[in-house]
Amino acid sequence: MAKDPKTDKSARDTHYATLRRQVRDAKRERGEIPTPAPQKRRKSNADWTPPPIAPDQVLLYGLHTVRAALDNPERKLIKLSATQNALVRLEIASVENLGIPFETVTPQDLDKILGPEAIHQGVLLETRPLPVRRLEALKESPLLLVLDQVTDPHNVGAIMRSAVAFGAGAVITTQRHSPTESGVLAKSASGALEMIPYIQVGNLADALGELHNLGFFTVGLDSEGPAPMEETLSGKRIALVLGSEGKGLRQKTRETVSALARLDMPGEIKSLNVSNAAAIALYATRQHLARA
């Protein structure tokens, strides 16, 4: 049923906005008001050359990302660069109290370092990588997330946010064909990189074996899995294993996990983006663990 503009405020606002736009367009056609000039296209990353970065240097940007890094006692901070506006939004009363060098910059200064397409929000934090974590340290966690060569840092960042939201103990991935700690990954994670261990292992099959020894039941998500995930989950300690965006789980991973399972979807589309699948699987697993 269509909303009545006379009684519904949002519909009324939309109705009046449409009328104003029609009047404005008519005036432009009659030459009574000027037509706005087309916006100048921003330079693309094709016009930008990134500056060299040392192996032990990580450039973090974005308000949520930098604020989380500043609050993380395990993050070694090197230098903060920010616009005056970003400094206010970060709620930093005194840069002297940070104990690291600070530089006031313009957005254009940061564009030169990060590229014109980086959504830096006027802030850049130079840091060292987070300390390396070991699987042994996760033995008390009831829920882990394992990624089998998920390559897109935006997907991994989104997965990190979901992992933090559902209380997972770590995100475990491979050293090869997986994003390293970077500004893009951290920005996509929107602060979650500082809140959950991101562990990269050399051999995923060996890591799964170690998780089994630590008491985890590992479930590999596969669209052709023999049973729905809800019927497959078992025990009080679970590690969910998700495959890459296109290929899914590798054969060795499929042979190593405790069980394969599928996310049942009644609609015509039977597969999801890996970050969406991770969020659904984490929710279902949390429901299981609450009953276990």
Image (tube, rainbow, N blue to C red):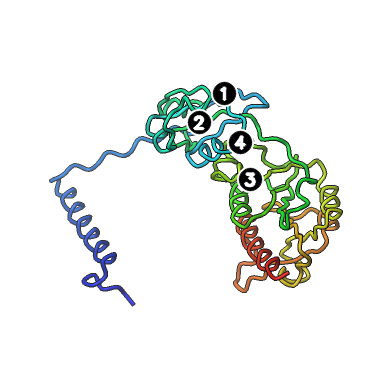
Tell me, yes or no, whether the two marked residues, 3 and 1, touch with CB atoms within 8 Å: no
**Crowd rating for badge 4 (residues with CA inside 10 Å; few <14, some 14–19, many 20+):** few
Question: In the rendered image, which residue does mark 3 sit on?
Answer: 152
Q: Which mark is residue 51?
A: 1
Q: Quadrant of residue 168?
A: bottom right
Observer-nearest residue: 180 or 292? 292
* Residue in the picture at 77% in, 42% down: 134
* Residue in the picture at 85% in, 47% down: 206
Distance CA(mark 2)–CA(mark 3): 22 Å
Can you say whether 3 is above or below 165 in the image? below
Q: How many marks?
A: 4
Distance CA(mark 4)–CA(mark 2): 18 Å
Distance CA(mark 3)–CA(mark 1): 22 Å
Q: Is residue 47 left or right of residue 138?
A: left
**Which comes sooner in the sequence, label 2 or label 3?**
2
Q: SS at mark 1?
A: loop
**Crowd rating for badge 2 (residues with CA inside 10 Å; few <14, some 14–19, many 20+):** many
Give the amino acid type for the residue marked by disc 3 in the picture: Asp
**Which comes sooner in the sequence, label 4 or label 2?**
4
**Which comes sooner in the sequence, label 4 or label 3?**
4
Give the amino acid type for the residue marked by disc 1 in the picture: Pro
Question: In the rendered image, which residue does mark 4 sit on?
Answer: 73
Give the amino acid type for the residue marked by disc 4 in the picture: Pro
Can you say whether 83 is above or below 27 in the image? above
**Which comes sooner in the sequence, label 1 or label 2?**
1
Q: SS at mark 2?
A: strand
Nearer the observer: mark 4 or 3; the answer is 4
Distance CA(mark 4)–CA(mark 3): 28 Å
User: How far across and how far down the image is residue 27, in percent?
Assistant: 15, 50
Question: In the rendered image, which residue does mark 2 sit on?
Answer: 124
* Residue in the picture at 56% in, 28% down: 126
